[in-house]
Amino acid sequence: MGILEIAAYVLVFTGAFFCLVGAIGVLRFPDVYSRMHSAGITDTIGALLILLGLALLAGWTLALAKLVFILVFLWMTSPTATHALAKAAKHGGVYPKLADDLAGDVAATTTTETPSSKA
Amino acid sequence: MLVGAALAILAVMGLVLIRALKGPTVYDRILAVNMFGTKTVLLLALMAFISGRHDVLDIALAYALINFIGVVAVLRFFEYDSEEALSAEIGEEDPDGNS
Amino acid sequence: MKQTVLLVIALAVLWITLSGHFAPLLIAFGIGSIAFVTWIANRMHVIDGESYPFGLVARLPGYWLWLVKEIVKSSIDTTRRVFGGADAVKPVVFEAPASQQTDLGLVIHANSITLTPGTVSLELKPHTISVHALHPDVARDALEGGMDKAVPEPRKATDHSPGEPG
């Protein structure tokens, strides 16, 4: 196994790790708005590392260009979708829970949902 | 090796489905479904390299676009779901007490 | 006219990269698609410097490198907050200054804020962007990060505020 391949696998697995972290965050965080941050991890650094790792495996082929296109499309569309979601949630009457009124809430969430996040 | 990463992505999709089922608001569900879609794109990209058929990347590319358009379309549908929000939008800017 | 030519070239490059085949039939399909898309774009009157900001292309790679660095930093921070206790998540909404003059510049700025984990832009207001952050510390880092200065903008901007180089 060449050094390039090892680097590729390290990148792919780090990306997969960040995706898992994002998924756990989506389960643990208290409201839609904070869950968006967690979803953002998987969409940005998770996608970047996995596609970068695959790009190292692809070498200088058309597959590399396609991976770059996928990354560019994901990075252009994901913030737009997130913004549309935030706007829709706000218009739908769901407002962000802020630090003050969350004090009891966070404790509740972390105690009830810790088992699922440890799994 | 890449199969392991693909399994991790599948696990992510499973976890996200839990959020999609639990809600509690419709926006949580849409967020989860959007995330499920982007993870599908990554899974397809991994599948392309696992199977050695790089044409699968075209499907991943098309899926990325369709997923985005689908999510935005669903959000347009739910944006003015509640009449209260619609009248607030028409009458006056929404209360700034939240910001 | 110059914009149209650039659009045709960009579409041709996109077609060749995605297909990778040079058979006469497929090339003919490509030429047909490019002609169709250019015709539609022309009919919609969207061929201008703003819709296809080719002038911006040269400055994007540098900006993307900077953005990737920010994304890596804040991803690690957000990862810590995912596994952190009750103190790790204290959402706040703050106003980030946005000095961009053009719509495109503002969109790039708002999208960059959303791309960085830990901050999500909620609403564009005149000269500011309303941002939801995971924690007051994240908000402080974002304000000190200098994203407003780093965002590339098409040169169309009419007047710059004094003291700010174009």
Image (cartoon, coloured by chain):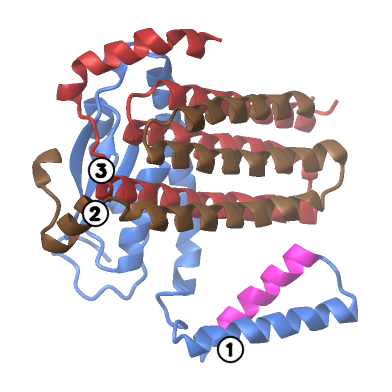
Chain colours: A red, B brown, C blue
- Marks 2/1 in contact by CB < 8 Å: the verdict is no
- Labelled disc at residue C162: none
Q: Residue at x 60, y 56 (%)?
A: B66
Spatial CA span between label 1 and label 3: 39 Å
* Residue A22 percent location from the top left of the image: 49, 28
> Which image quarter is the C terminus of chain A in?
top right
Instruction: Give the residue at mark 3.
Output: C131
- Say what secondary structure mark 1 lies in: helix
Whether C9 is among the magenta residues is yes
Q: What's the residue type where badge 1 is placed?
A: Trp
Q: Residue at x 46, y 53 (%)?
A: B74
Q: Which residue is drawn at 33% across and 50% down?
A: A88
- Say what secondary structure mark 2 lies in: helix
Q: Nearer the viewer, mark 2 or mark 3?
A: 2
Is tag 1's residue or tag 3's residue first in the polypeptide sequence? 1
Q: Residue at x 30, y 55 (%)?
A: B80
Q: Can residue A52 be seen in this view?
A: no
Q: Start and end of the magenta stretch?
A: C5-19
Q: Can residue B84 be seen in this view?
A: yes
Spatial CA span between label 2 and label 1: 41 Å
Instruction: Give the residue at mark 1.
Output: C39
For residue C152, above or below residue A41: below
Q: Mark 1 lies on which chain?
A: C
- Say what secondary structure mark 3 lies in: strand
Instruction: Give the residue at mark 2.
Output: B83
Q: Do labels 1 and 3 share a chain?
A: yes
Q: What's the residue type where badge 2 is placed?
A: Glu
Q: What's the residue type where badge 3 is placed?
A: Val
- Marks 1/3 in contact by CB < 8 Å: the verdict is no
